[in-house]
Amino acid sequence: MRRGKAKGKQIKKGSFVATLYKAKRTIAGRPYHYFRLAYHEPGGRRVIRDFGNEGDANKAATDAAKAFALGRPDALSFRPEERQEYDAAEKLLDGTGASVYAAVQAYIGSLSGQTYERRTVAEVVAELIADAKARKLSPEHVSDTSKRLARFADDFQCQIGAVTPALLLKWLRGLKAQDGTQLSNRTKFNFQRHVVGLFRFAARLRYIPRTLADEVAELDKPKPEAAKAEIFTPKECAAILNKLPDDMIPAFVLGAFAGLRPAEIARLDWSDIRMEQKVLIVGAHQAKTASRRVVPLSDNLVEWLLPHTGEGRICPVETPGWMAQKFTDGAKLAGVDWKRNALRHSYISYRLAITADPARVATESGNSAAMVHAHYKALVTEAEAKSWFDIRPTTPSNVIALPATA
């Protein structure tokens, strides 16, 4: 069997989009023409159906659009009496410009004394992101929300009220990475958290009934796997520092000895560091949680920073991704395996061993005391912690002596 090259045209019906291909296949030397209809269900599954003539393919597209307007892809397998009811409802709405879904939504709203405006998932996502920016939430939060909800909008190209809890649950369970592997429960949990926020936002703006937002919020959540906090040893940290470019040292030591997140370091300015008071200020616009905090500077951190003090931004690279790449390159030269977020994990672990005060460490690192206690307690000894905060520069500033106790 050999297939000819297919050319497609788009069929749009409301928020439903399908592609119709006219193609041919050769069987036993004879050409056979056919029409292929391809579209995505609201949950993201791709559907491909072949027809002998274009009329049947167009009718199938119309039926699929009707089913999605109801929020019921299973409506493609309507029983005869269900099809009659649906067709009768559509006939009643002829000339009104309203879909069956909109009419049902309006009817439900009339029972509760409320009316709801029609919005697609993509439209509500755009409004939510605009609202987050207007409220000056952190760029990191806005970026994360945008990426996760953009995927949700791509997979649900329909009215937001047509996304039922059952469809959403199916989508969450089937989420996969770009390479086709299943996402972790932690990642699925984060997707679900953002989607729940989207539905609550839509309910507040009266785009959907509050009962729908509540049902979405009540869906069982995947249990995140226990995250292992990987850390560097003092010897590994010192070895990486020996191999870093001179202009990347301030960014590295702020992660290692102050526990700053990469995104916070990227936005930090030298004016935020108060050497005379031995503190640095992470402003609300710089912090992940959009909450200002004061971080103490250890003696060894002051020694690392002093030769580099100046004006403007501390880190020469603009994004956390580029920063991580620079650190990874330094670790490779040092013969050390780079571990994601290990600088921050190391700081919290060693700082907790020194202070034995989860609440204090949580305040300094912009975390919760419960999280610090659960993930970082007893990972290192006090002696190891003292070695960590005793890693100091020599002359020149990017060469140091390894701690004797490491």
Image: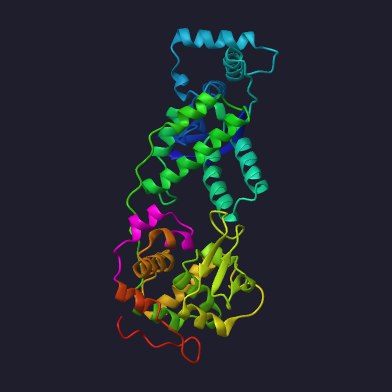
Whether residue 299 appears in magenta in the rendering, the answer is no
Residue at coordinates 64% horizontally, 20% vertically from top-left?
115
142 with respect to 42 (left or right): right
Residue at coordinates 48% horizontally, 23% vertically from top-left?
72
| Percent position of residue 61, x then y | 55, 25
Q: Which residues are magenta?
A: 361-381
- Secondary structure mostly seen in magenta is helix
Residue at coordinates 52% horizontally, 69% vertically from top-left?
323
Q: Is residue 16 visible?
A: no
| Percent position of residue 151, x then y | 52, 43
402 or 96, which is in the foreground? 402
- Which quadrant would residue 332 be assigned to in this image? bottom left
| Percent position of residue 81, x then y | 46, 7
| Percent position of residue 146, x then y | 57, 47
18 or 222, which is in the foreground? 222
User: Which scheme is used to colour this image of the protein?
Assistant: rainbow
The N terminus, quarter of image: top left
